[in-house]
Image (cartoon, rainbow, N blue to C red):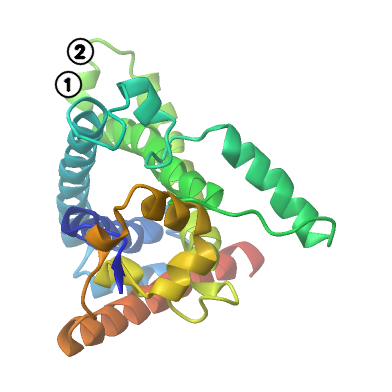
Amino acid sequence: MYRRFKTLDIILHFTMMVTFIALVLTGLPLKFSHAPWAKGLMAFWGGAEMAGLVHRIAAAITFLYFGAANGYFIYFLFYKKLPGNPNPLQKLFGPESLCPRWKDIQDIIGMIRWFFGQAPKPKFDRWTYWEKFDFLAVYWGMFAIGLSGLMLWFPEFFCIFLPGWVLNIAHIVHSDEALLASGFIFTVHFFNTHFRPSKFPFDPVIFTGRLPKYELVEERPEQYKRLVAQNRLETYRSNYPSAWVDLFSNVMGFAMLAIGLFCIFLIGWEFLG
């Protein structure tokens, strides 16, 4: 077994997962207030007032982990020691970074060619292009959803220096961007992470932080070769997750998958029904 995610990564993802689910389940009955299931979902929270409180608490926690993630980015770029002592720009576009780079473009083209049997499957490093896309989609959404949400949360403050009609725009942006984010996470992200044939029905790595060696070699051969060349592979060696960690990973993971698919069902029910 080898370590893929550190404890901070696991905590941040778990926090994001729980708060995101809470935000979606409290926001959907507002977005689709006329839907037949909206009253039942709002009643589950104990009414609109309690749902609003849960929504705001989850939003506040979201801003906290977003700030923690940005703090880690600064640490990674300017303070973290990496082999070869790269400068911040080299770190930003290096293999350990989630920032897109030219290799991701090559991998996308290579993947399309592989789909049609015209080339071998691209060899990935620590992050694949779809993982970077997933991350950047959420990161960008924080600015659109977060800022518009703050404007709706504290309208008196923002209207000190902004015209009132901006709140109407904030309402549209917050509602539609949140719907886009939830639809993306519960379909594209779920497929990329869990529903691909090689991962179906569930990949526990974000909960355990560890993966077997054969997965590292098969799925991320560039990272494996790089770690071997740098004599760093053994520093990633880890133990098998305990039975309790494995149990928690599966119970929590499948529960979140079920809730996400349930939300997609409600959204599809509204749009198609």
Q: Position of residue 83 (x, y in %)?
A: 29, 37
- Residues at marks 2 and 1 touching, judged by CB atoms closer than 8 Å: yes
Q: Position of residue 217 (x, y in %)?
A: 48, 66
Q: Tag 1: Cα neighbours inside 10 Å, few (<14), some, or many (≥20)?
A: few
Q: For this view, does 98 lie left or right of residue 62?
A: right
Residue underneath mark 1: 157
Q: Residue at x 17, y 29 (%)?
A: 79
Residue underneath mark 2: 160
Task: Classify 230 as above or below 152.
Answer: below
Q: Position of residue 138 (x, y in %)?
A: 40, 45
Q: Secondary structure at mark 2?
A: loop
Q: For this view, does 173 lie left or right of residue 233?
A: right
Q: Which mark is residue 103?
A: none
Quadrant for residue 205, please give it: bottom left
| Label 2 to label 1: alpha-carbon separation | 6 Å
Outermost residue toward the top in this view = 161
